Amino acid sequence: QVQLVESGGGLVQAGGSLRLSCAASGRTFTSYNMGWFRQAPGKEREFVAGITWNGSGVYYADSVKGRFTISGDNARNTVYLQMDNLKSEDTAVYYCAADADFRPFSIVTTPSFWDYWGQGTQVTVST
């Protein structure tokens, strides 16, 4: 089992920045791809960003490219999501997720393929 705990959410003005953290514990997750998803009220959960377990690839949704950066620190079992130039449409609950299947060269963007989830952290962008 893997436990994921997100932190770093909050209220920020449009154009501002936030950094989300996801701390993993339990079974080692060094071979798991890690990702961030978000869910706004009345909408389906959507892929935001992902990073392969070996760091060979990072992937982003078109809506956040150039503004968000995903990174990982295996020594600390932590994944980060740096969010810059935030927009009102970024308002959502953000979830960290881990994919236990061995995919060294790709990221699956469909939520149902991901095996472990954090409890979520709220990000609210005001205009």
Image: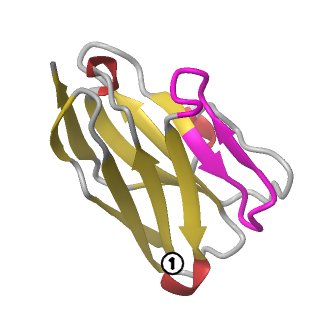
Q: Residue at x 40, y 19 (%)?
A: 44
Q: What element carries label 1?
A: loop
Q: In this view, does 45 lie above or below 21?
A: above
Report if residue 89 lies within the magenta region.
no
Toward which corner of the image does residue 21 lie, by quadrant? bottom left
Q: Position of residue 118 (x, y in %)?
A: 36, 55
Judging by the rendered image, the residue that carries numbered circle 1 is 77
Q: Which residue is drawn at 27% across and 38% down?
A: 16
In this view, the residue farthest toward the top is 42
* Magenta-colored span: 49-66
Q: Where is residue 10 in the image (x, y as percent from the top left)?
A: 16, 46
Amino acid type shown at disc 1: Asn
Q: Position of residue 85 (x, y in %)?
A: 37, 32
In this view, the residue farthest toward the bottom is 75
Q: Is residue 111 above or below residue 8?
A: above
* Total marks placed: 1
Q: Is residue 70 above or below residue 49?
A: below
Q: Position of residue 19 (x, y in %)?
A: 34, 54
Q: Residue at x 54, y 32 (%)?
A: 47
Report if residue 60 lies within the magenta region.
yes
Judge from the rendering whether residue 25 lies leftward or rightward of residue 123; answer left or right. Answer: right
